[in-house]
Each structure stands twice: as C-alpha cells, then as structure tokens.
Amino acid sequence: MLPTSSPDILDRIVNAVEAVRLRLRRATAALEAAGIPYAVVGGNAVAAWVALEDEAAVRFTQDVDILLRRADLDAATIPMEAAGFVRRHVKSIDMFLDGPGARARDAVHILFAGEKVKAEDLHPSPDVSEAEGLSSMRVISLMPLVRMKLTSYRDKDRTHLRDMLDVGLIDAGWVATLPPELGARLQHLIDTPGG
C-alpha cells in the first residue's frame, strides 16, 4: 500500500509521459535551431507515425532516440548542452543526460547514421536524410523506421511493428519490398498477430 502522502498514481503517469515529451521537444528544438541534421527514431518515431492514423493507438515510450551522423556529434553537443543536457558515453552508448543528476533512463540516446547499433545487426541505421518533417521535428521516414525495427527485432520492436500493422501503416505488401531476412521477420509478425 502506498503512503497517503504519495502523489496520485495517475499524476505520476502523466508526469512520466510529459517528461519524455518535453525532453524530446527540447532536444529537437535545440538541434533544429542549430541546423544539425537529425531524425527522431525509436518509439517516439513509431508514436508519431501511429498518431497520424489513430491517436488512441499511440503507445507511451520512455526513450528519446535521436539519429545523428557521427561527424555531427561534437557540433550537436553545443546546442544540446545549452538546452540543459549533459553529454555522456555510458556502456558504449552516447547520450545526453537530461541534466547533471539525471540517470541514463532520463536521457536522449544517440544512434549513428550509417552504422550498426550492435555488431550482430543485419543492417546499419539509415541516414538522417531519410527523415521528414512531422509537426515541429524531423522524424525518420516510415520505410527506414520499419527496417530499423525489423533489424533490432527485440520484444518492444515487435510490439511497435504490430502497432504499425494494426493501424494499417504497413501490411503484407511491404514484405517483398524489404531485404529477404527482414521481409521474413515481417511476414512472421503478420502470420502471428497475437505474438
């Protein structure tokens, strides 16, 4: 049982969602203002695309993932630090913590364009040029986002792909447009909708 002085659980949920939204907005605004090429990727990119089809199907994500060219990391550090972020390299991941006392969970995680996230990945990340403006930020286009999710293929990636299937952003027609190993993964998700 929670102590009576603790905040209402609904307020805590709203605060968690809002913190991620504000972190994403601050990071993208800083990069936009500085003219640094970037793309929002990961769960927030999925949420942006899903929201275009069905806002009620949007899933909360705790991560803010940004795609940068490695050559732009130092240049991106200047506006990100001016926006209150602190650059760190933790467990082979480059990130911008949301303030000096923040945890890795409260950060903007950087993925590098044209590089594999993990050595065993089937394909490298796309380039930031494969992004488009959605609202006030640059979001990776749908096809490279689907390729990234199929390449990573963790539980949360499969869930994100199922969300995109459920709202009709992608369908069986995509299978043949993908590299064979990624097409096979998408076909498996289509054939096993419940997991």
Image (cartoon, rainbow, N blue to C red):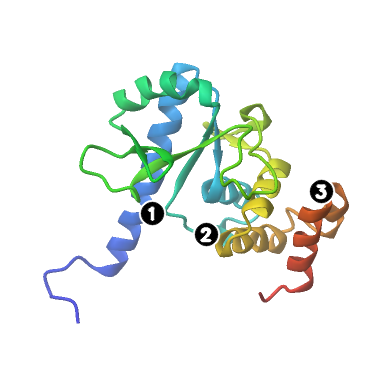
Residue 60 is left or right of residue 180, and the answer is: left
Image coordinates of residue 103 in percent, x first then y, are 28, 48
Residue 127 is left or right of residue 112, and the answer is: right
Image coordinates of residue 96 in percent, x first then y, are 36, 36
Residue annotated with mark 1: 17
Label 1 residue SS: helix
Amino acid under label 2?
Arg
Quadrant position of residue 163 = bottom right
Q: Is residue 45 above or below residue 28?
A: below
The answer for how far apart the CA atoms under marks 2 and 1 are is 10 Å
Q: Between 39 and 113, which is closer to the camera in this rendering?
A: 113
Label 2 residue SS: loop
Q: Which mark is residue 178?
A: 3
Q: Residue at x 44, y 17 (%)?
A: 34
Amino acid under label 1?
Val
The answer for how far apart the CA atoms under marks 3 and 2 are is 25 Å
Circles 1 and 3 in contact, beta carbons < 8 Å: no
Label located before the other in sequence (3 or 2): 2
Mark 3 or mark 2, which is nearer to you? 3
**Which residue is situated farthest in the bottom direction here?**
1
Label located before the other in sequence (1 or 3): 1
Amino acid under label 3?
Leu
Residue 81 is left or right of residue 35, and the answer is: left
Mark 2: few/some/many CA within 10 Å (<14, 14-19, 20+)? some
